[in-house]
Image (cartoon, rainbow, N blue to C red):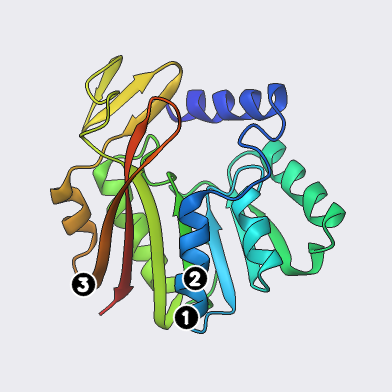
């Protein structure tokens, strides 16, 4: 399933350049305020795609490492960063989050991930990823992520891959229970679990904000 999802995303970015538009997501707008209030300067975005949120952070003055496993998405991101005059504040990183993050300990002030954690990742992989996020955050850093949850209309629809992962329309999604949110917050201070909706379905999501304890 992993390679199938990688190929699916690469093909999707190739067929639909800038598929999510140029405007930042609503969670990124909120996250920028959170990071700014915390005095953050250097951010890591996981699952940056073609870059609408990473570019917003860069325009706000943050330095951003934008990570994704799609070369096509990152190429679009890098081109847009040059066109918008923020290439000096954006670094792209080709990376699969199933592997350890290739960043030093305590190297970023904030980590943002919009729907990356609810991709085709098992609970064990999510625990490992969350530990890696904690490792690369500086003291006082903040992790903001969003996930579709088990109240979403697509939960239970399509192909069941187990562990609350369902594939619908070619996309595999790990739908989060509140128990899973709390599990991934063990050893952290959980500041907020904010429900919101996105898209025409609409997708039902949580925006989670937490910091290392």
- Quadrant, the C terminus: bottom left
At mark 1, the secondary structure is: helix
In this view, the residue in front, 124 or 42, is 42
**Residue that appears at 67% across and 39% down:** 73
Marker disc for residue 37: 1
Marker disc for residue 126: none
Q: Position of residue 113 (x, y in %)?
A: 46, 54
Q: Residues within 10 Å of mark 1 (few under 14, many from 20)?
A: few
Label 1, label 3: how far apart the Cα atoms are: 23 Å
Q: Residues within 10 Å of mark 2 (few under 14, many from 20)?
A: few
Q: Residues within 10 Å of mark 3 (few under 14, many from 20)?
A: few
At mark 2, the secondary structure is: helix
Marker disc for residue 187: 3
In this view, the residue in front, 130 or 98, is 130
Sequence-earlier tag: 1 or 3: 1
Kindly indicate whether the residue at mark 1 contacts the one at mark 2 (C-beta within 8 angstroms). Answer: yes
Q: Which residue is mark 2?
A: 33
In this view, the residue in front, 198 or 81, is 198
**Residue that appears at 85% across and 56% down:** 82
Q: Is residue 40 visible?
A: yes
Q: Is residue 99 visible?
A: no
Q: Position of residue 84 (x, y in %)?
A: 82, 57
**Residue that appears at 34% across and 45% down:** 147
Q: Is residue 15 found left or right of 132 in the rendered image?
A: right
The vertical placement of 89 against 140, above or below, is above
The vertical placement of 188 against 139, above or below, is above
């Amino acid at each position: 399933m992993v390679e199938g999802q990688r190929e699916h995303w690469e093909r999707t970015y190739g067929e639909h350049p800038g598929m999510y538009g140029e405007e930042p997501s609503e969670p990124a707008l909120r996250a920028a305020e959170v990071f700014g209030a915390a005095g953050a300067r250097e951010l890591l975005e996981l699952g940056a795609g073609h870059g609408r949120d990473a570019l917003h952070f860069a325009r706000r003055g943050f330095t951003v490492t934008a990570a994704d496993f799609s070369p096509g998405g990152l190429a679009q991101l890098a081109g847009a960063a040059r066109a918008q005059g923020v290439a000096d504040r954006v670094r792209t990183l080709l990376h699969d989050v199933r592997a350890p993050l290739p960043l030093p300990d305590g190297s970023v002030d904030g980590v943002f991930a919009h729907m990356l954690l609810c991709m085709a990742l098992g609970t064990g992989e999510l625990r490992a990823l969350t530990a890696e996020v904690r490792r690369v955050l500086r003291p006082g850093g903040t992790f903001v992520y969003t996930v579709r949850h088990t109240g979403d209309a697509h939960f239970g629809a399509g192909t069941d891959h187990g562990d609350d992962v369902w594939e619908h329309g070619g996309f595999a999604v790990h739908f989060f229970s509140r128990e899973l949110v709390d599990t991934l917050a063990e050893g952290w201070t959980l500041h907020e679990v904010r429900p919101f909706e996105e898209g025409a379905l609409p997708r039902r999501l949580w925006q989670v904000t937490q910091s290392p304890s």
